[in-house]
Amino acid sequence: MLLDLARAHLIEPGGTYGRWRMHDLVRLYAEALSRTTDSDEIRLEALSRLFSHYANTARAASTHVDGDPAAVEADHRARVAEGGSGFPDRRAALDWLDAERENLLAAARTATGLGSDGAKFQVHLALSLMPFLSWRRHLTDLVGLLDLALAAMRPEALTVAPRQREGAVAEIMNNRAIALVELRRLDEALAAFRQAGEHLADLGHFQGAAETLINMGHVLVEQRKPELAVRVLQGALAELPDDSPPGVRGMALTNLGMALHDLGRDEEAVRAFSEDIVICRTLGDCIGEGVTLNNLGLSLSALGRIPEAIAAHTLALAAAEETEDDFARGLASSNIGFAHYQAGDHEKAVAWLEAALAVLLPTGETHWTSQTQNNLALAYGEVGRFQEAIDLLRGVAETIEPDADQHNRAMALTNLGTVLERAGRLDEAIATTSAAVNLLRSLGQMRKAVEALHNLTLHLSRAGRHEEALSANAELLEAAVSEGDGQLIQRARSLREALLADRDGHGSSGTS
């Protein structure tokens, strides 16, 4: 029958194999006919049935995204026993969510202004789709859906008890802020977390308030404010009630570990990550375990424990493959590649980083994709593929918008300077690294600015511009002292001695 309808041009294949849709002209005719022959009440009843179907089915599907397998199976059996619909496994649920995503979002937009039924649908759909949209990294869709849900929670749109309303609003705001973090809209995220925490504290939901503090700590890590992040996260851990879910404590430990890693306190970071991994394994949280294993690997690399780091990232890759998470798979592959780069195995690094990029680019994610491109360019430089490295880094620096991820732009400029120097293009290296120093200073990322200043000093020296090199070294030493970094101070002083010897040596040869 379907093929007969298709041959008559009444229906056509949908965007997913096995699904069909009405031909555009038939759909427009049906819509116009309904508007002329059906009352507003009948049309609203039809929409309400659609909303109910989508809300119930989306809720059933979402339990498979990050739910406990035993609980998911029990929920499925209960739904089938009640004559309802369910999904036999995670693959079936994800197939339905992928196929229906645009329809679900369109239905949510259509529900605006359709009374309490429309408002309830928007709220229920938002809460159901949060795990899926976040996991698939449809983050802009998620923020838009949560904005609709927040509007639906206004008193004039939906009548609920004030305390229930405030609790739901805080939950929606908290999850909206999490999506904003992933979109790198960090200032907005921090403000949203703060507002959600105030809502929860006013309601006496102290655990929820502590959870927003944990999320605020994550934002501070992403904003390159690790000292403040450590204070916030240690405070959040202290405020967590004794009966808090273990997963909440685990999330705080991982965020704390990230901040400690950024401060160079990697032994402490390893302990925090290891404790969270135990929690994740106890809970059967494969997704959370993968995230923390990746972070653990970064700290192990920083400690020079490269084989252990590669082992951690490899376990993270296995977790990503088990959960069919392309973004996590790409990130783990990228980290394996960078660990090989740190170990000096540059050919392996190139292979892993190219494979990671092939996975990350289709996801549309930009922050970690840019970092992978940065690292791949460094690896290209080590194997003599200078022009590919230069083109890749220039692409990163030029495509990042002025109000977007300036940290990765600064890293691209810093790395580009290094590659240009290795390619013998010293004047370009000096100009590029100078721009990186200025950008990092404007971002307040002084530790990274000090590293770039060190590179700039070397570029100037190798170009024979000795007085400029000494001037840059004086800035480097002053910045290192300001940062209180003993290792950098010693490096700057040793470099100054070498610069003076080099200058004097060139001066002597010039007068003899």
Image (spheres, rainbow, N blue to C red):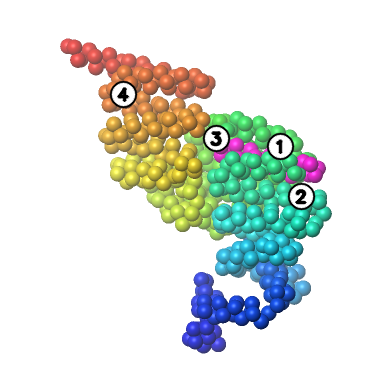
Give the amino acid type for the residue marked by disc 1 in the picture: Leu
Query: Which of disc 4 and disc 3 is earlier in sequence?
Result: 3
Between disc 1 and disc 4, the foreground one is 4
Between disc 3 and disc 2, the foreground one is 2
Query: Which of disc 1 and disc 2 is earlier in sequence?
Result: 2
Give the amino acid type for the residue marked by disc 2 in the picture: Gly
Between disc 2 and disc 1, the foreground one is 2
Query: Which of disc 3 and disc 1 is earlier in sequence?
Result: 3
Element class at badge 1: helix
Give the amino acid type for the residue marked by disc 3 in the picture: Arg
What residue is drawn where x is 47% and y is 22%? Answer: 479
Magenta-tinted stretch: 201-223
Residue occupied by mark 3: 224
**Residue 329 x, y percent position in the rendering:** 51, 53
Q: CA distance from mark 3 to mark 2?
A: 31 Å
Label 4: how many Cα within 10 Å (few below 14, some 14–19, many 20+): many
Residue occupied by mark 2: 167
Split into 4 quadrants, where in the image is the N terminus? Answer: bottom right
**Residue 263 x, y percent position in the rendering:** 56, 31
Whether residue 438 is in magenta: the answer is no
Q: CA distance from mark 2 to mark 1?
A: 22 Å
Residue occupied by mark 4: 461
Residue occupied by mark 1: 237
Q: CA distance from mark 1 to mark 3?
A: 21 Å
